[in-house]
Amino acid sequence: MTDHGKVSVLMGIYNCENTLSESIDSILAQTYPNWELILCDDCSTDGTYALAKTYAEQYPEKIILLRNETNSRLAFSLNRCLEKTTGKFVARMDGDDKCVPERFEKQIDYLLAHPDAVLVGTAMQRFYNDGSFGAVDACRPEPDKFTPHHNGPTFNHATILAYKSVFDALGGYTVSPRTVRGQDRDLWFRFFAAGYKGVNMPDPLYLVREDVEAIRRRTFRDRWISFETEIYGYRLLHYPLHWYVMPVLRLGKALVPYKAQLLYRKLQTKKQS
């Protein structure tokens, strides 16, 4: 297998003791061997840090473990990880998800086959704690600066692999009250404003755990700060004024009961099966 350079994997972790082993084990199982995993614990209150420490001690040449002094949220944690990267590529991973063994190998090959692109994401397969699978979430193959206006993700954030130079040029993630829930969307707006191109693979190389409780936990404040980021991005990309209606409509999603949102997801799964 050709070594195209090291992949630095960024993983912010918080209270994921019950799922972290599966996540790290899926990185250890990668067919592309040249990688490093950088974990940043955001002051977990369970056994997450202790578990991560056992992995860091067992694989000192592959895993770096950081810990925040205070709970500072994901964008801050990811920036701390970025400071420690030594790879040519940067990839994302979450502590409650898994990826297939060929993920990095296939993403690098796909990125090299599209020399005009600097970032590649993948589709992701939803799965439940009982072992069953849900819908496959795929993004547009070649999103552009207008894609964030449309409903649906531009890239599935946790699936991305990109050149480290892109993160350096963009200054990493924006740490701000308005990016507590939308650090990825903020990144895409800045990505396109800088003139970069990204691509998406149709292959579901990433397995995302379906967290029903996460839907319930999303408050109106969460939706509001996401709305603020959208307005910021629309201005950055000089969208026409009448397009601003779409963020307002998305804000209205906060009024939809979580049970209805869950039912919608289940209907998506049925439609795909």
Image: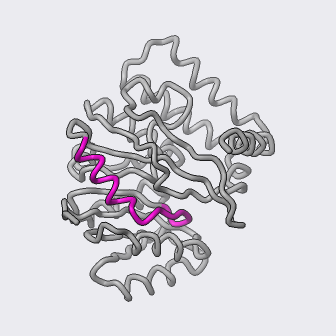
Among the 4 quarters of the image, the one containing residue 211: bottom right
Left or right, 173 with reference to 204: left
Residue 72 image offset from top left, x and y in percent:
47, 60
Q: Is residue 53 above or below residue 91?
A: below
Q: How is the image coloured?
A: one colour
Q: Nearer the viewer, residue 110 or 149?
A: 110
Residue 80 image offset from top left, x and y in percent:
34, 63
Residue at (79% x, 40% y) in the render = 260
Quadrant the N terminus occupies:
bottom left
Residue at (39% x, 59% y) in the render = 103
Among the 4 quarters of the image, the one containing residue 146: top left
Among the 4 quarters of the image, the one containing residue 249: top right
Left or right, 159 with reference to 256: left
Decide whether residue 105 is among the magenta residues: yes
Q: Nearer the viewer, residue 118 or 11?
A: 118
Residue at (22% x, 36% y) in the render = 116
Decide whether residue 106 is among the magenta residues: yes
Instruction: Give the extent of the magenta segment.
Output: 94-113
Residue 187 image offset from top left, x and y in percent:
38, 41
Q: Is residue 255 above or below residue 5?
A: above
Residue at (50% x, 46% y) in the render = 177
Residue 241 image offset from top left, x and y in percent:
48, 12
Q: Nearer the viewer, residue 64 or 147?
A: 147
Quadrant the C terminus occupies:
top right
Q: How many numbered discs?
A: 0
